[in-house]
Image: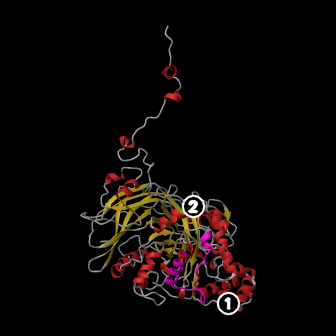
Amino acid sequence: MKKFIPLFAAFFVFTGSASAQIKPSVVSPDTLYPGKAYSPYAQRSFPSHVYWGDSHLHTGNSLDAGLFGNTVGLDDAYRLARGEEIKASSGIPVKLSRPLDWLIITDHTDLMGFAPDLQKGAPAILADPQGKEWAEAFQKGGVEAGKAAFDLIGKFSQMKLPPALVKAYSPGADVFAGVWEDNIKAAEANNEPGRFTAFIGFEWTSVPKGFNLHRNVILRDGGDRARQVLPLTTQPPIGTTDPLDLYQWLEDYESKTGGQAFAFAHNGNLSNGWMFPTEKTYAGGVVDENYVKLRAKWEPHYEITQIKGDGETHPVLSPDDEFADYENWDVGNLDLSELKKPEMLKGEYGREALKQGLLLEKKLGFNPYKFGFGGATDSHTSLATAEEDNFFGKSTSVEPSATRVNHPFIESELGKIEGYKLVASGYTGIWATENTREALFDAMQRRETYGTTGPRMRVRFFGGWDFIDNDLRSRAPAFKGYEKGVPMGGDLKNAGDKKAPNFLIYALRDPIGANLDRLQVIKGWLDGAGKLHEKVYDVSVSDGREIVDGKCKTPVGNTVDLEAANWTNTIGAAELATVWTDPDFDATESAFYYVRVLEIPTPRWVLYDKVRLGAKIPKEAELTGQERAYTSPIWYTP
């Protein structure tokens, strides 16, 4: 009888030690996958992760946050952003549905630290008659404290603060330096490269005559460089409201420290038409070659959506865009000292600014409005909450309650901004190689970013000349995107003999969010006669609906349950993708393109307040909306 030896045992019997005999075969990568490694990820150098964060958040060290009761400090603001549960100033427990990847705390530099001292009755405040009056009102609390807060904010926005108080809380004062040091220490303590990025930054709060011309400043660097400077302020007689002075501060910062920084604006919709000037600046300057060159250099980013209204476009500017009327605030400025006029709109919205930038580039040689898009909360609660079902409002005074919907956000003899008009928005997605200050900053500077109104959908947008439908037959379309084109924020290379550019576009819904309605390409261009145009193209839609001549006229539908504040993903699509070619391209005309991603309708935060808190909702309030994402543009220059 023959003895049976299993094959694997025979191997050891006849060859000896397996470790001595089994060796991996050496195979040339070109043999398996010509020109590339077999693993598609082994030699990947392009940004492969999107990192989510809030680029605009205030703690109680900001004047208009502390005055309205914000007591949540720097460390708790970071803890919440990193996924921990904390208590809001109102005592309500709060936690994000998912942690963020990065955060910029941007406290207002003017009177930084003033609000906590006001409530304590600090000597520097009591020494000034007006300061003493405000401090006594705050000690009384209630209505008197509220009146004092609005009086103080009003004088701030009208540049009429007492000079002695400004001096006591400006660069050169111990309190100011101390608060700046606290900001630096908190950012350094919470910055963990690869896990969470805490940027050092601030808000330069230019608000002459009530015009909202604020800029946030972000540093690429750590505390060693940040400590060499003090932030710029705006209040007279020490500060300045001219952006040219801000650009000089940025230049000086980089020269002195060897670091890097840039600025970005927000809420052009409240600027009385001055955020995006084309001829003269509000400060009496002119939009000349020097202005456009400096603005192009120092402002590569724009906060297109946030709590005080969406800043993409307005129905008056975009009458053919059926989705233009989204969370618009039709007031002149935040303190309502002036009302909106139609002629203001051209200088207030992002899409129009992109168009005017084409015209200025032809005229002056530089495009001052060649910026990428992002979203932020601008929350003054220290809470980076942007989801509709987790909305904690603009300030502590409008944290969740049954009455906040009906409590005006601001009111004057000229009108009011109703409480229900606050927007649960937004976040910025950054495509970067790693979660570090350096990588994220560099990605923002090259404009590889997109803003959303809160959801975290993944969006890819590439422009080129040779994309084909087959490029989408992959779960990783970015490989072809980077290989054959440029990403969002980039410039199309010369057309050569190509007939028209095409674009590879992909969007995947937020994993815990709503399905997608459609993908749209927004194009703006300057024709040979010097006239500006825009057009919105539907390029991919859900549910088998038809697109005819760039338009899908069939709405996606609405599954929102108004009784339960819920929706179902029984309509829409989990992902949408397409390769789209511009049917109206003229190689002699400069143009830009960006993608707008629309979700199916979902509940606004006011509906959650109705269902959870029993809030009585005014009939004018919108109960549902279609949340969205805006990619940074891709430009074409002849």
Q: Is residue 603 above or below residue 6?
A: below
Q: Judging from the image, what secondary structure is the residue with disc 1 in?
A: helix
Circle count: 2
Q: Could you tell me the amino acid type at mark 2?
A: Leu
Asked if the magenta segment contains residue 248, the reply would be: yes
Magenta stretch bounds = 224-253
| Residue at numbered disc 2 | 100
Q: x and y percent of residue 24 in the render?
A: 46, 34
Residue 454 versus residue 221: which sits nearer the camera? 221
Q: Judging from the image, what secondary structure is the residue with disc 2 in?
A: loop
Determine crowd level at label 2: few under 14, some 14-19, many 20+ residues with C-alpha closer than 10 A: many
Determine crowd level at label 1: few under 14, some 14-19, many 20+ residues with C-alpha closer than 10 A: some
**Are the residues tagged 1 and 2 within 8 Å (C-beta)?**
no
Label placed on residue 164: 1
Q: Residue at x 36, y 50 (%)?
A: 473
Say which of marks 1 and 2 sits in front: 1
Q: Earlier in the sequence, mark 1 or mark 2?
A: 2
Rendering quarter of residue 73? bottom right
Asked if the magenta segment contains residue 460, the reply would be: no
Q: Residue furthest top?
A: 1
Residue 226 versus residue 143: which sits nearer the camera? 226
